[in-house]
Image (spheres, helix red, strand yellow):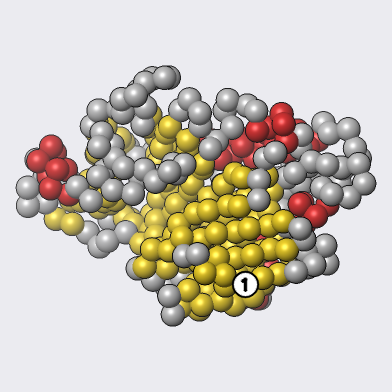
Amino acid sequence: MIPACFSNSNTLSNSSEMPQNLITCIYQTQLCNSPTYLTLTWSKTIFSHSLTIHAADCFSISISLNPATFSFFRARPGYKSIYLTHRHYQKIKLYWDFTQAEFPQNSADPESSFYIAITCNNRLEFFLGDLLNELTRRSGLVGARYSAEATLLSRREHVFGRRNYLTRAMFMGSKHEIGIECGGGVLKVKVDGEIKLVVKRLAWKFRGNERIIVGGVEVEFYWDVFNWVNSNIGTNKCNGHGVFMFQIGEGGVWPEMVGPEKRLMRKSLSLAATAAAPMPAISSSPSLSCSSVLQWAEESSDGGRSSCSSSTKSGGSGGGFSLLLYAWRKD
């Protein structure tokens, strides 16, 4: 089940540490010739903007995209040598440059004019961005070998709003704007401004799934707005979050929440636990990414494998992709 979140919305949303946007992307790549899941978590709050790069059992590092509070200047290009935790003799180099990065409005991850790169033994093993020539100039990687391109397996995003929630995603190489609108007991799903699905009577249909077409591609859409429906019952007027997933093919891979994402979920659970009204029991499981939506998707695709491990597949990684949205209400 989705962790209950019947928190005091004013307390949560008024915090200066409350993210304006929080995005986790997981890529399948290689580190020193070993297959690896690489997790990038982008976090943006009122006073900070950061990126956390994590590879389980290998390394974890956070980069500030703003050098100081209230600064209008972004951090300078940088690089860092990192020894992999489970292989002390293996060293990688991490390079980044966000000085000219362009960010869509209210988005934590950049759209253009940036790069992130990882090299091992003068081999470029991971690259994200559009400034490869700039990386080559700064790093001296002229003629460096480039391993197979990294594959984006899944994107998990926390969006915040009152009624409308917007994000963007790549489906089969095409970029689309995704819109979720929920109000008056009706759920609307829009893709590039076009209504793709309308779900009425959410009090009875608070969980479900439907197939929609996005750019000629079949996408399985799952929703769970139980928290929102329950928040309007009795004396419980807290807002919580809805969960929505867009899945192509066999789905993606879901890592355990770390860093700012983990802190956000734990804070919401803590506030829920101290709410005045009687609440359902809250799971203390460390795997905060567990969700009825993920379990439902897995059961429909492969007979019900658990999605609650530290890095789990949602149906598999054979050519699939999943976009998971946590939509947080704020009033």
Residue drawn at the location 19% of the way across and 47% of the way down: 131
Residue drawn at the location 59% of the way across and 39% of the way down: 262
Q: Quadrant of the N terminus?
A: bottom right
Q: Which residue is more in the foreground, 311 or 195?
A: 195
Q: Is residue 292 left or right of residue 252?
A: right
Residue drawn at the location 76% of the way across and 37% of the way down: 7
Report x, y in % for residue 224: 71, 60
Report whether residue 174 is seen.
yes
Report x, y in % for residue 267: 67, 33
Q: Is residue 278 left or right of residue 213?
A: right
Report x, y in % for residue 156: 52, 53
Report x, y in % for residue 219: 53, 74
- Picture quadrant of residue 139: top left
- Picture quadrant of residue 225: bottom right
Q: Is residue 102 left or right of residue 329?
A: left
266 over 179 or under it: above or below: above
Residue marked by disc 1 = 197
